[in-house]
Image (cartoon, grey):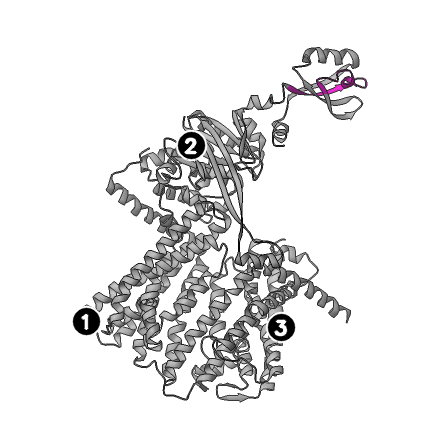
Amino acid sequence: MNNSLPADKLRFSTLHLIGRSLRTAFAERAAYRGDFILSFTVSFFIELVTPLVTLLIYTSGSAFPGWSMQEALLIQAVYLLSRGIAMPVFFGMVWIIFEQAREGTFEITLLKPRSPLLLTILRGLDIEGLSRLFGGILLVVLTLRALPSPSAAGWISFFIFLFLSVFILFGFALILAASLFVWVGNGRVSELLESILVFSRYPGSIYSAALQWGFAVVIPLSMIALYPAEALLGRFSPMMFYAIPASLIFFGAGYFIWKRMIRYYAGGGG
Amino acid sequence: MQIRVNGLKKIYKTYNRGSTFGEVVKSIFHRQMSEVHALKGIDFSIEKGELIGFLGPNGAGKSTTLKILTGVLFPTSGEVTILGLCPWKQRKKYVAQIGAVFGQKSQLVWDIPPVDSFMMNQAIYRIGSGEFNRTLDRLTEMLGVRELMKQPTRNLSLGERMKCEFIMAMLHNPKIVFLDEPTIGLDVVAKDRIREFVEEMNRAGVTFILTTHDLDDVERLARRVILVNHGEVIFDDGIAQLRRYFGAKKILSVSTSSPCNIEESNANGLRLIKRLSPNDVELECNTEKIDLSSLIRDIADRYGLRDLLVQELPIESVIKELQK
Amino acid sequence: MKRILDAFTTLKAVAFVTYKEWAAYRSHMLLSLVVGPAFFLAQIFIWHAVYAGRETLGGFTLSQMLFYYGASSVIYYLTMDFADWNLQMLIRSGKFITYVLRPMSHRFFAFSQKIGHRILGFFFEFIPVWLIFYFVFKIPLLPAEPFWAALSILFSFIILFLINYSTGILAFWLTRTDGIRALIRLLRDLLAGVFIPLSFFPEIVQKALFFMPFQFISYVPVRVFIGSYELAGWKISIPQIVAIQGCAVIVMLVFTEIMWRFGIKRFTGVGA
């Protein structure tokens, strides 16, 4: 049996593993076809509630100061898009850890010659979450059509910020999963996350200046949807650029916490 | 030596939260810590190709030792060298060469056929397709699950599922396989099949470490037994030695023509275990003190022998004794 | 009379056991102290910004709007349950059969469970959150007419239970109900005015919503709590809307009973 593979065969085998995992994720979900289609659709509609509320606010004659309806909806469309990328890939991991920490089956992951993070992410791939991705793309396209075209700088910044946005959500997923090793069986983790993420869906102007800075550099919630949207709208601000390193630090913190928790688990904690 | 364990110690810290309300409130401010000495110094070594029964009551330190041996847990102190590697320090390299079957934790994905889970393992363990197909063919042939493995796991019976769990564990040709309650809940036929499979693989050179409460498994498969209790090894020797631990004792089940009271005349070395009727008794005989053939002749002469069964002391009673 | 007393004894027993069961998970309940106020905090920012330069919107002043959300929040902690998840879990796992074998209506059993669970919720969710609203957000959530508010909340408690329970009954027909339950929960919350007061919806929609059971879950008790009820331009007095709510309870009881009969026939028919 060969343990030391040349470097490119190693890379190939990781791709092969990802491919296998995607097939398994599809096959698993396809086992309950009818429910899948419904869940797929509903998870998209759930995310439409916030844009709907925004729509209703504007149609009743009011507005977020300094933001037109399409501009405000753009933030929420970008939010949906970013979640659409992060959730199918990274958030299934949270529920896998939830179950495995509770039933003591995480050992099985540790018995395999791969990174436990990689294996858990792959096991948790969630096809259902893709509805948000399609919905997000659709909504972004629709709202952008009613707005002036973004500049090249706008597009480039948008994609950089979107990339960071997905990594911030990944960081949150890591923190949630890690917490489940300590607070075993806490089924309300996703509620906790939602109660934090709610602040990322609205124009920055609704918060005080101090809070806006907090959402830029302490917990970079504004990078999740607001800044990518503002990039497309050509509204740049200094806070955005401070948020870039803050986002990377946040992700790093999440990764560090995850590693610490694995070590805690392997040390026999709990 | 394939496996070497030296001075393994594991201490868990637990926090006492208390049970009364007052204690719980106090515990928020000052947590009382107590130490649990799960392992107090474990030593043993295992050669390639052995089949070891690793036994002990629950809470004895068995699972802790196993977790350390599989690289999942790291000890407080002590050394473990397996296949020249330290399990928890060189985890990825080490686990690529071992396998594990858990009777109570499934590695198969529930809603899809086992064969899909097998292919997932192929990707995880980086097994070349030629080698993978050969191994898969061989294992499915041995266990007779070639068609079964294409059905969703949830449709299979427990016995069929366990066979697939075994295949899952051995697809990457591990040198050492850890078995944790592998036959639990299985019917007699399935248990037999699994045991045959383990024997065959063991003959081919795979080392097995078997943890189970099913002593039939142990009697049938293990040649050597390591008994752990209160975090220490209290017995490490062959099965035959285990049986002879309390001297060369044998159990005699005797049915006589007329009422038998042989135990009264042979107080030293003979003990009555059970009296089913005046003519039917179960005796424990210490063959180091009493010659077995003279005893039997004696019973036949005095009471008339109708039926006789001579058995080894069951390991169960030996183990119960040792665990006291 | 004896039957009522018996039923009450059973209710007390089941509620008490459920209370003790869930008391082990008190810390999970305390998370509501973070989640509820966090969502509300977001609403404060949103509506303060939206109300800049305006007195009223959707028929509410700013303070009324915040009171609306505050009241929704605490009423939720008094009336919520997961009867849908519980029932479908029992049916899916097969454990439901142990309830068929008991001389007791499972619906009544589940209702008693809800009472026990919500009593715990009263102490660990409702009161702490109410206090946070009072001291931190400076919003005293006091009902305009306590008697009608209490009655309305009681009706809402029962109706939400019946709606969730009916959703759970679907598990007799479907192997996996995750999708349909999520859909019903979404519609239920949206059309109950949880995300935004119903008066913001277009008038035709409001007219349709009046005849659906969802408004009685949250919108009606919140309005009664506030002290004035209006929907689709119709202003109705508090006693009258609570009476209508009472009728809705009866309608839902009948509906759930019918669904149950169909469901149980299917269950036992399949061979138990």
Residue C2: image location, x then y, percent:
77, 69
Crowding near the residue tagged with mark 3, few <14, some 14–19, many ≥20 C-alpha atoms within 10 Å = few
Q: CA distance from mark 1 to mark 3?
A: 61 Å
Write down the residue under mark 1. Answer: A151
In this orientation, which residue lies closer to the viewer: B183 or C77? C77
Q: Mark 1 belongs to which amino acid?
A: Ser
Q: Is residue A190 left or right of residue C254?
A: left
Is any part of residue B59 visible from this angle? yes
Q: Tell me, for residue C254, which label it has, or none.
A: 3
Residue A21: image location, x then y, percent:
36, 49
Quarter of the image where the N terminus of chain C is located? bottom right
Crowding near the residue tagged with mark 2, few <14, some 14–19, many ≥20 C-alpha atoms within 10 Å = many
Give the quarter of the image for residue A267.
top left
Q: CA distance from mark 1 to mark 2?
A: 61 Å
Residue B260 included in the magenta stretch of the image: yes
Q: CA distance from mark 2 to mark 3?
A: 64 Å
- Residues at marks 1 and 3 on the same chain: no
Q: Mark 3 belongs to which amino acid?
A: Val
The residue that appears at 68% across and 66% down in the rendered structure is C11
Write down the residue under mark 2. Answer: B176
Residue B306: image location, x then y, percent:
75, 17
* Chain of residue at mark 1: A
- Residues at marks 1 and 2 on the same chain: no
